[in-house]
Amino acid sequence: MRRAGNDQRALVASARGRPWPELVRICLSRLDGLAGHANAGIVFMADPAGEMADDLLHYLKAETGICAWFGAAGEGVIAGGTEISGESGLALMLLDWPQAHVRLIHDSSDFASIDGGLALLNLAGDAPFDARVLGPAVRTLGGRSSSAFDGCEIAGVTSAGGCSGLWLGAEIPVALDILHGLRDPGPWRRITSAVGRTVLELDGRAATDAIAEDAGELLVRAPDRLVRCLMVETRADEDPFIAPGQVAMIECFDRQRRTLRISNDRPGGWLRVTYRNASAALAEIDRLTSGLRRDFPTECWPRAAILYSSVDRGHALFGPAESEAARFQAALGPIPLIGMRSREELFDGALTCGAAVLALLG
């Protein structure tokens, strides 16, 4: 399973439906004793395994001898083309990187020592994040935990909230992208009145009236369907109209108050409706993943892929007949994949929702 040169691909394994000690033993047995060849590990836990993150991490260190573990817990985890959700599960990945080019990020106080490269970050459920504390040369990718349990983010130790992760130096080649699966955006409308994340007026009209005009009255009469099918993009006044906006979920469409509440705390000056579409999202997986593979530096092959995909994707978007994990793994070919379901997704310093963020790691 190991290869010469820069083509020493990561090793990945998963297990489900057992108590956490058995999950660890099953995963390590599937890795066939190769933990001794790795110096870093990624661990994602599907609830309720996240409740035992501290014990699980201690066991992993003792069994593998690896101290540099990074990971988190969520509603679901991904390993290869398999997703585990709705039951206790574990996804493990073992990697071997030059020690000088990787560093654990225990909390935001470590950001000051980071210069360039990629920061893979896990955010606790209520942790604030401000990309301005990172240098402009640092790229970021990660997600907010969707676990029901606190303290299940891992960076060498379990955290008590906040932001933690793994830094990869600029010497390690990476390629990353963000996927939303959207199509047919409506016209940009000026936000003429808003309070926090609640939009009161668009173009001087009640927000719900403007959305009804763009989305169609039939769809608007079924608010639950509207929340599933529609998203919005927002942008600041100074942003160019040709650039994509910041994507946000519709949290509440209140016909009685004629207001719209979205997931973006700072909606900016403009808003437009856009549609979530399963076919567009599947085609986007194939297109962008192939593009990342094509654009990866030619001197080496990607060793691994890491994915944070929204809890609002998966079966919620594609239905029970389509596996998002399997689609990503098919597009990646032999590149091992690990991932988790996230509440929000982080890409290049900005938090969004309803997205998938993918990184290929060399």
Image: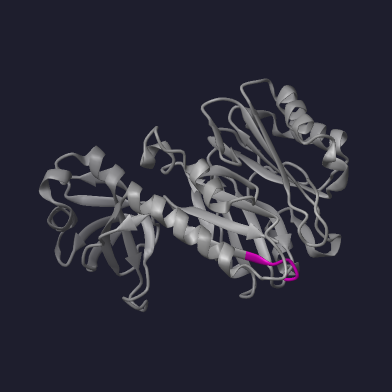
Of 127 and 37, nearer the camera is: 37
Apparent side of residue 123 relative to residue 35 in the rendered image (left or right): left
The percent position of residue 85, horizontal first and vertical second, equals: 53, 31
The percent position of residue 86, horizontal first and vertical second, equals: 51, 27
Residue at 72% in and 62% down: 168
Q: Is residue 172 magenta?
A: yes
Q: Quadrant of the N terminus?
A: top right
Image quadrant assignment for residue 94: top right
Please identify the residue farthest to the top as the structure is shown: 18
User: Across the whole image, how many numbered discs are drawn on residues?
Assistant: 0
Residue at 67% in and 42% down: 160
Q: Do we see residue 1 in this rendering?
A: yes
Residue at 61% in and 75% down: 136
Q: Which residues are magenta?
A: 170-174
Of 17 and 52, nearer the camera is: 17
Residue 353's place in the image compared with 292, above or below, is: above
Q: Is residue 183 magenta?
A: no
Q: Do we see residue 256 in this rendering?
A: no
The percent position of residue 51, horizontal first and vertical second, equals: 64, 29
Image quadrant assignment for residue 233: bottom left
Of 108 and 221, nearer the camera is: 221
Residue at 47% in and 43% down: 324
The percent position of residue 188, horizontal first and vertical second, equals: 24, 68
Image quadrant assignment for residue 104: bottom right
